[in-house]
Amino acid sequence: MASYPGISSQAFKHPLDQQAELALRSVPGFDLLASRFSEYIYERPQQIYLMGNNLKVNPRQYSTLYGIYRDCIQDLDIYPEPSLYVSQNPLVNSYSLGREHPYIVVNTGLLDLLNEDEIRTVMAHELGHIKCDHSILIQMFLWVRNTASFIGDITLGIGKIMTTGLIYAFYEWRRKAELSADRASMLVIDDVNLIFKTMMKLAGGSQKYAHECSLQEFIKQSDDYHRMDEDSLNQFYKIMIYNGANDTFLTHPFTVERVRYLQEWSNSAQYRQIKQGNYPKAGKEGSINVDATPKNQESEDLKQKIADLQAEIERIRNAKNS
């Protein structure tokens, strides 16, 4: 384990995350959405719900989990300390949200599946989201996804926004943000095989048959998946699966893709420099401000790809219905 005093998220933030955020902020409708979000959405109801229906972790409540959590907070130099809750839920999952008062929620299903080292990996990942200031955009993303369908034009006037490339840009950014959080986990854990083992268990792990799961086979599966890109048609199908061709958008990259990205970064000069203490120090971290960021060529290119993808998906859907 290692600590990084004063580290800025810019030290490890994935460039695809940065580019996708720029593209999102420059899509028509983002400014309106941001203003409506700031006007109507508050954190207090969620804080009340969490305090009322979950266990808040502290030195006397889930003390082992709290110790792991505190170590990760110190390693990534996060202040103030976000709240941590345990939810009685068999779904193997965790998430981080909150702007003024950030928090992390861990389901009991995840705690029951993973060992302590693997739980540390997840804690570092979720804290990576908070360190990168992903929380405000994730909250906006969830709000759009969960409420816009019935709020429509009546209250907030965002029904038409949902028919533009904004929703595609949100999902594109949401997936890329996971790559930055994976890097935060790598900095804390400094053991790529442990992180891969955790990913393997989250993808399809079982307590009963854990002894029959092979990390080597999982990494080989990632390599085999990567080789599928040699066929351009496979690349097209992957993009379509990510972006709602089956009426379901994916919020995370495929696990085997995350393996590949993290494997490359763990062997990079950038990672070695950070480990040696050579990294940008924290100033004003970026994503809290919901104002639109100035455009650059990468964001323009990505925005065009999103628009092209939307048009292609609509064409396929229309063909199915004709």
Image (cartoon, rainbow, N blue to C red):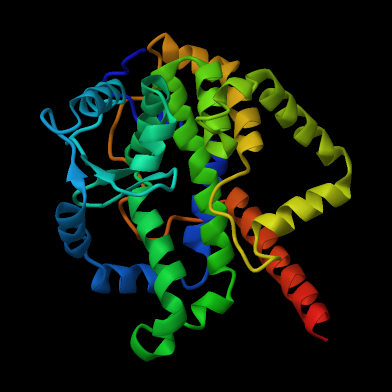
Q: Tell me the residue at 57%/78% (across/down).
A: 163
State the count of labels: 0
**Camera-side residue: 246 or 258?**
246
Q: Measuring 30% from the left and 21% from the top, which residue is drawn there?
A: 75
- Residue at the image position 76 percent from the left and 36 percent from the top: 225
Direction left: furthest residue: 60
The foreground one among 208 and 30 is 208
In the displayed structure, 49 sits above or below 316; it is above
Q: Quadrant of residue 169?
A: bottom right
- Front residue of 293/103: it is 103
Q: Residue at x 52, y 76 (%)?
A: 162
Residue 258 position, x and y percent, is 60, 35
Q: Which quadrant of the figure has residue 138?
A: bottom left
As drawn, 39 above or below 59:
below
Residue 124 makes an appearance in the image: yes
**Quadrant that contains the C terminus:** bottom right
Q: Position of residue 241 (x, y in %)?
A: 70, 57
Q: x, y percentage for residue 204?
A: 59, 37
* The N terminus lies in quadrant: top left
- Asked if residue 128 shows in the view, the reply is no
User: Within the image, what quadrant is residue 47 found in?
Assistant: bottom left
Query: Percent x, y for residue 182?
Result: 48, 32
